[in-house]
Image: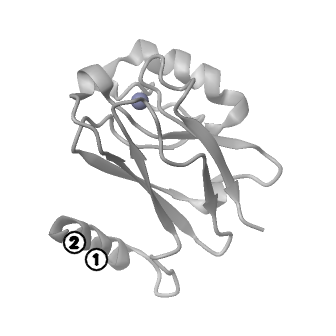
Amino acid sequence: MKRRLFALALLALVAAPSWAASSCSTTVEGNDAMQFNQKQIVVPATCKQFTVTLKHVGKLPKAAMGHNIVIAATADEQGVLADGGKAGLEANYVKPGDSRVVAHTKVVGGGESDSATFKTAALKPGQDYSFFCSFPGHAALMKGTVSLAK
Ligand code: ZN
């Protein structure tokens, strides 16, 4: 709890005064059954930036049941996954410098969490975006949509 408050305080320092931290972030939980607890992330268009926090609520270590959250255009998902798989766990299953990736967290294991912040402007109107776990084999179950609220 203390750590979370500290993180929020840090975010508040970085953000513009008009930015409402409460609505410009979300927390997604991942578990040992290879599931996220939500299927969509809606980003309010009023947010300049948005933070996604992944909380692994399971017990398994990241080498066995690691999860991350990668956000990319839905059309790029398969390419990002293929290259991420080759990059390996040390690279959090994301190709270093992959320009198709809007944002991604680290791979976390049970009891761990990580956050990723991106500029809302990175989501282009008319483009479909997805979030998914790039741990090999997980994206079939661990995926959802990312959309800008109208
Ligand atoms: Zn996963």
Q: Is mark 1 within 8 Å of ligand 1?
A: no
Figure quadrant of residue 80: top right
**Which residue is drawn at the image coordinates 23% and 45% (left, top)?**
112
Quadrant for the N terminus in the image:
bottom left
**Disc 1 residue crowd, few under 14, some 14–19, many 20+, Cα 10 Å:** few
Mark number for residue 9?
1
Residue at x-position 32% and y-position 29%: 66
Please state which amino acid type lies under the numbered disc 2: Phe
Quadrant of the image where one finds ligand 1: top left
Residue sitting farthest toward the bottom: 17
Q: For numbered disc 2, what is the local secondary structure?
A: helix
Give the labeled residue for mark 2: 6
Q: How many marks?
A: 2
Say above or below: 135 vs 148: above
Q: Is mark 1 on a helix, strand or loop?
A: helix
In front of the other: 17 or 6: 6
> Residues at badges 1 and 2 in contact (C-beta under 8 Å)?
yes
User: Residue placed farthest to the left in the image?
Assistant: 2
Residue 15 position, x and y percent, is: 43, 76
Q: Which residue is more in the foreground, 113 or 71?
A: 113
Quarter of the figure with the C terminus:
bottom right
In the image, residue 85 above or below residue 104: above
- The answer to whether residue 10 is left or right of residue 140 is left
